[in-house]
Amino acid sequence: MNKHDPNGIPHTTPRMSATFTPDINSDIRRAAATGIYDIRGGGAKRKVPSFDDLLFMGASISRYPLEGYREKCETSVTIGGLHAKNPIELDIPITIAGMSFGALSGPAKEALGRGASAAGTSTTTGDGGMTPEERGHSTKLVYQYLPSRYGMNPNDLRKADAIEIVVGQGAKPGGGGMLLGQKISDRVAEMRNLPKGIDQRSACRHPDWTGPDDLEIKILELREITGWKVPIYVKVAGARPYYDTTLAIKAGADAVVLDGMQGGTAATQDVFIEHVGQPTLAIVRPAVQALQDLGMHRKVQLILSGGIRSGADVAKAMALGADAVAIGTAALIALGDNDPKWEDEYQKLGTTAGAYDDWHEGLDPAGITTQDPDLMARFDPVEGGRRLRNYLKVMTLEAQTIARACGKNHLHNLEPEDLVALTMEAAAMARVPLAGTDWYPGKPGTTY
Amino acid sequence: MQTLDLQEIGLRQVNETLHAQADNTNQTAWEIVNPKGAHAIACGLNAPIEVSVMGSTGYYCAGMNQQATVNIKGSAGPGTGENIMSGKIVIDGDASQYLGATGHGGMIVVKGNASSRCGISMKGVNIVVQGNIGHMSAFMGQSGNLVVCGDAGDALGDSCYEARFFVRGSVKSLGADCVKKEMRPEHLELLQKLLDEAGIDADPQEFTRYGSARNLYNFDVDNAAAY
């Protein structure tokens, strides 16, 4: 008998709704209390089909492996050889994605430059222009050309090793940005020609071109200004990867940067991050298909980003046809973002290490996503650079380990035939067989 | 006067020749003939030279200009003088859309009309248009001055920051957060200076000043309809 029921009628156990979960209910309560949508940093946190749903098969009797430590597995990549006089030569195919000074502190940008340079790869500016810290410590620096044109300066453009025209990013395809007033220090305000302390909106469209025909002319202008020396990348979100890649190539891009929905942002509406865009796993094959259909695969490079974390992810991206990857969130974690050593302070901010994503508020205990001088002082750019270098080296070693096991003497020799999928969804997206079968949904020659 | 025939030597050679001029060049006068609406003519200049383009131009003529004076003896295509940093661009005819987009400094003078989005996201450039301007001009204008001797189209100064707009004629409509403002003596003085620099004879007293109401500077849910 139920002791709480005087009549002895059995009660059902309290049942939580699968629709109105505690998370959802907290969203509703927050919206009701504040009247403003939730803005946060980072990428999609929801579970989506990912590279974790793929496995390499490794060598067997029909394929023989390379000897680890003895037989070479190359990792270098050249980006931008199609049109540029000075293509970018990287030792490793893992680049640092664009992140703005403003969103990140000056020392954090310096650390990204130090770490990337030590590992033989490039780093990228962001919305807000090029800082001396970053240029000075980056042997290869890609200059982002964004809709806002904050800090856009032809002198900096000419100092860049490549130019990346940003059309979109995976966290918010079709969206602009917002750097809230609390992060607008004197220096950030000056670089962006705006008053201190006001919200800075970044436009979602470029102010002086629309569509692929205009993009072709914009690329011509940038090439003329820089004397056709440096590669020009076009960065697009993982919205319509086949068509966007096709149009970027048609417009004359040297490289296409393709960013899936796990890719981070400094500050965007949570609803945008979680509900617009496609998973990184889903966008790579259509983009590679576009390159192949135009006869441009390996001529125009594909740089894939959005939730890349390990050498396994790198190897899987390569196997599906990417030429390189870019990392953002993972690089910040390597620098010390969300480190449990700051747990007490994360708790004071109402969060916990690993979940902290209010990067736009400028209160980052790790001193990375802030412009507060006291917090910034906690971060050592030399040590941060060393940690990033180590991480990049480990990712590279991991990818090489897998490639050797598949018998490949260059990461670019990995191929879809090396992979199987663990789920039907991943098989369909990656166009590799479901493990234990020779079939994937949509496979040519099949009717189901 | 050095003459470059664009049809004969091509765009690359024209721009390369102009880019090769250093700060102390004594070859300061250049003429580009047969532009025939080509794109990206004389973009990325960075020397105290004067370039006259003898005809109409396509997209992005004099884009990102520094120091140089570029005279367009015809009409100018979209994005002319985009992201100009310094120097001066004078367009004898009309200008297409996005004139002086994101310009950080310098001056652009249009003797005819300018199309839509004139001065979009301007960040310090001064633009003086003798005729009319189109819709959505100075959208998100951050700083600098836009002077219009004729009329302005719809949504002037939408979502603007600290850029100033002086219009002599009518304004079809003002954009979000853009309001009419008092013309104080310092504004009359500034406007006279801009008109003089542009070589345009007009009485500052006949102009009305517009600028940001600064209501959208920090997010407020009560203004949600304006965002």
Image: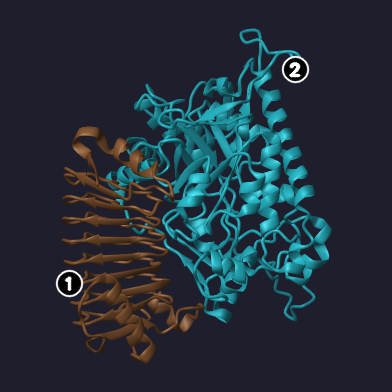
Chain colours: A cyan, B brown
- Find disc 1 in the rendering and name its residue: B131
Residue A13: % across, % down: 70, 67
Q: Specify the quadrant of the image occupied by residue B138.
A: bottom left
Q: Report the residue that reaches farthest toward the top.
A: A61
At a point 72% along the width and 55% down the height, the residue shown is A337
Numbered disc 1: secondary structure? loop
| Residue B62 placement, left or right of A430 | left
Q: Report the residue that reaches farthest toward the front.
A: B26
Could you tell me which chain the residue with mark 1 belongs to?
B
Residue A202: % across, % down: 46, 63
- Find disc 2 in the rendering and name its residue: A68
At a point 27% along the width and 86% down the height, the residue shown is B208
Could you tell me which chain the residue with mark 2 belongs to?
A
Question: Disc 1 residue type?
Answer: Gly
- Regarding residue A256, the answer to whether it shows in the image is yes
Residue B184: % across, % down: 36, 92
For the C terminus of chain A, give its image quadrant: top left
Numbered disc 2: secondary structure? loop
